[in-house]
Image (cartoon, rainbow, N blue to C red):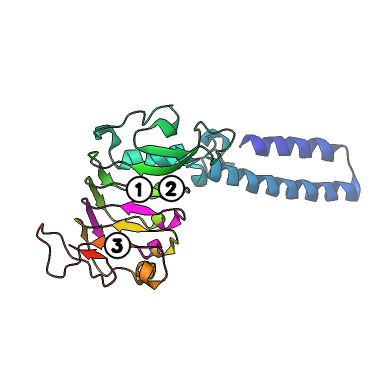
Amino acid sequence: MGMIEKFLMTLEDNAIATTGGDSKERLRKVMLTLYAMVTVVWAGLCIVYGVGESQCEDDSGTPNPSSAPVPVISGERDALMAFYNQANGVNWNDNTNWNSNSDICTWYGVTCDNELSQSSSSSSSGKVTELKLKKNNMFGTIATEIGLLTQLSYIDFDSNSLSGTIPTELGLLASLRHLELDANRLTGPVPSELGLLDNLKEVYFQSNNLSDIMPSELCARRDNLGGELDTLIADCSGDGNEFGFSDIVCACCTTCF
């Protein structure tokens, strides 16, 4: 039995022992209601904050499945570390200060805006606004946690070996202006969620193996249609390009390779 249950049962026994008649029954109902409320709140804490397994046991002493350790992203440091790990950061050409206790604003390729305040408990001096990791020997996939870097306005992953699909979570980056993913090994379609980005001005997809049709939601952001997007480049020549990359159908691209 968990420590919360033991505490409430002890409290109930002591209170009821000194009460009689109808008052005893009313008190028992109150205690049962209190027990249910605390149990729900405690279960929520187990899930959201990942408190210790021993503190989230059920009455049988078996750990509650909902309390199994799960990755909890508590801030930009955790989001950056998720990206680092999935992109094999240990093998980057330059990973200065990454995976350390240093201010994340000092990590190689990371730029912060010090005027965008973090929480008082944060160990960084500002919010991450740029990730510039061009030609840095990155391989693996782009972590979905990148969507948690809410003030990110500039991404440059040009000329690496990133694979997998473009994460739809990029559509959460409302401040994103510049997205440079060219010269990687990305596959699959361009996510339509990029069409949610009102501030997007420059997008580079060429020299990948993307497929399907450029989303109409992104095309609608072109500057000739009243949007901000003035540069959209992809492998869309229609006859395969000289480097052998697959084509994407794009009627709104500014340049096709």
Is 129 left, or right, of 166 in this rendering? right
Q: Residue at x 27, y 67 (%)?
A: 253
Percent of width and height locating residue 256: 20, 65
Mark whose residue sits in front, 3 or 2: 3
Measured from the top left, where is residue 105 in percent x and y?
A: 43, 34
Going by the numbered disc 3, the residue's amino acid type is Leu
Q: Quadrant of the C terminus?
A: bottom left
Residue hosting label 3: 232
Q: Which mark is residue 243?
A: none
Locate residue 224 relative to residue 40 in the image: left or right: left
Asked which quadrant contains residue 120, the reply is top right
Asked whether disc 1 touches disc 2, contact meaning CB atoms under 8 Å apart, the reply is yes
Residue appearing at x 70%, y 35% in the figure:
7
Identity, as a three-letter code, of the amino acid under mark 1: Ile
Earlier-in-chain disc, 3 versus 2? 2
Any mark on residue 152, and which? 2
Up the image or down, 251 lies above or below 17; here it is below
Q: Is residue 150 left or right of residue 11?
A: left
Tell me the residue that label 1 is attached to: 155
